[in-house]
Amino acid sequence: MKKTQTKTEIRLAGSGGQGLITAGIILAEAAILDNKNVVQSQSYGPEARGGASRAEIIIADGPIYFPKATWVDILLAMSQKASDQYSFDLKTGGIFIVDTTYVNQIPTSSALAIPISSRTREKFGKELFSNIVALGVICEATKVVSAQALQAAITARVPVGTEKINTEAFTFGMKLAKEAIKNNNGIEAEVIEADS
Amino acid sequence: MNKKTSYQLMQGNEAVAEGALAAGVSFFAGYPITPSTEIAEVLADRLPATGGKFIQMEDEIGSIAAIIGASIGGCKSLTATSGPGFSLMQENLGFACLAEIPLVIVNVMRTGPSTGLATSPSQGDVMQARWGTHGDHPIIALTPSSVEEAFHYTIKAVNFAEKYRNPVILLMDEVIGHMRARVNLPPRSMVEQINRVHPNMPHEWYLPYERSATGVAPMASFGDGYRYHITGLIHDAKGFPTSNPNEARDNIRGLFAKIERGFSEICLVDYEYMEDAEHAIVAYGSMVLSARSAIEQLRESGIKVGLIKLGTLWPFPRFALERFLPQLKTILVPELNMGQIYREVLRVTSGKAIIEKLNRVNGTIIAPQEIVKTVKGMVR
């Protein structure tokens, strides 16, 4: 069992206030619902808003020792700075998702480029749900956790009374990813194999 | 997806709060500070709901004063802070040591000195925990290296404080405080709770600092009917100031004796891959996580390296090193400071092995690969 274990390292990076740490917690809770082992950590500055913010999630079948991501399998960049800083940490064959609302210069043509925040604003009137939309994108594009688990984790974590709109945001994100992959906005349609 | 799972995602700081509740803590006073604030947040919500008290004080001096008072009133008491707040607590920490007040201070360490790097990890307060308050005094400092251990060590910290009538410091680093992991916590019925010994003699016979055979004096709560005096001056068995050299000696030596008596119980140490080890990594807190990952890689390349994991830093568990000295060629001490436990390791091993340190003080943690590289260099 030890030999065949898989480990996926995920980094969600952007600015403080975008809800990336919350998104990281939800993703980690979804992994637990999928019966995986998981560790989540974060890094942020002293500011409440603005400044660099990053959440990391490691999902594995076996034990996880070191809690920080080193070579990431999945990278979400929601700011130009995050994209510039972290794209080099992506493993060969890793999946790179950029929010083109805030990332104008994408360092690689193989990124899945989606204007996550602006599409969220169009659809819901504010960017508040961008993090949940981003989770929908990640789920559809990577299958790193099951949609069912992620949906349950979102519902359990968001404030009471907002479950419905957050579910819509999640579904919207999955739809955005589907469209982008179909239109071949960057990445190949091939995704990392979801383990059973 | 399996709904029956009893696993949950929990943060290190949340685990401390859960541990405090499981240990029977009923009073928290504190002042919020990154990276410890989640402990106060959880307890602000949970303590009042279970009949306990939560109070946000004006600063950390007031916070430790409040938990000293609550403890004298009979409550298991705890506060949580980080380096800057821990500095402010030092004076009253000394009072609690001398007056023998059970309490727990959680210090989630961030990079210092001063305001430092407020959101970044460090292990820079190890020596402050030992000697931050003035005068000769014993102290107990525990340091968890996982979220689950944060829960269990908080319970141990409360239990040791009660059993030995001594302040206990739970030293965490920001990594352990803020990381979230899958945990499976035991039900409350499985948690061992130790309570301080109360006096049972007639009120007028009570001598508050007369040590029992365990080395610890029974402690009456204010309001129980036992009238007694507590002071920060050196005191006699009645609790009143004395400058008699014999009584002063008994007072201070008595503090040390009770901790020495509990030494083997207080020292929490774990060994991994040490049976055949020729090289050891001595680690605590988040450095254990880096070390484990490094050891897995080093073992794969045939290097016989093991882990000595320190769960207790003070009193320093010297036997954990001494027992392996005959088989060890080298010891590496990775720390997020300039080498505070390294000095202890040097002292204890006194030249009987090659000791090296690996230090980091830039707000980031030491990656497994750096440990691998350093150990390979030492082995060669």
Image: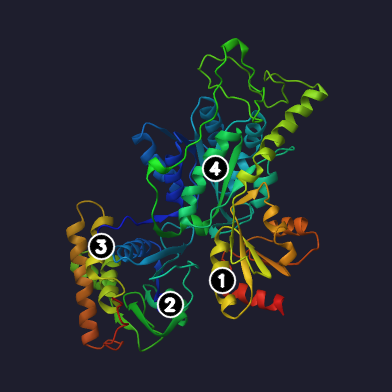
Judging by the rendered image, the residue that carries numbered circle 3 is B2
Chain identity of mark 3? B
Whole-percent x, y for residue B289 in the image? 53, 64
Do the residues under discs 2 and 3 have CB atoms within 8 angstroms?
no
Q: Earlier in the sequence, mark 1 or mark 3?
A: 3
C-alpha span from label 2 to label 4: 37 Å
Can residue A112 be spotted in the picture?
yes
Of the two numbered discs 1 and 3 in the rendering, the one whose residue sits closer to the viewer: 3
Q: Amino acid at mark 4?
A: Ala
Secondary structure of the residue carrying tag 3 is loop
Inter-mark Cα distance, 2 to 3: 27 Å
Residue B169, quarter of the rendered image: top right
For the N terminus of chain B, the quadrant is bottom left
Position in image of residue B183 (x %, y %): 40, 56
Neighbour tally class for label 4: few under 14, some 14-19, many 20 plus, Cα within 10 Å? many
Same chain under badges 1 and 4? The reply is yes
Pointer 2 with pointer 1, Cβ within 8 A = no
Q: Check disc 4 and report its element: helix, strand or loop.
A: helix
Residue under circle 1?
B367
Say what amino acid the circle numbered 2 marks: Val
Three-letter amino acid code at the position of disc 3 = Asn
To which residue does mark 4 refer?
Answer: B157
* Chain under callout 2: A
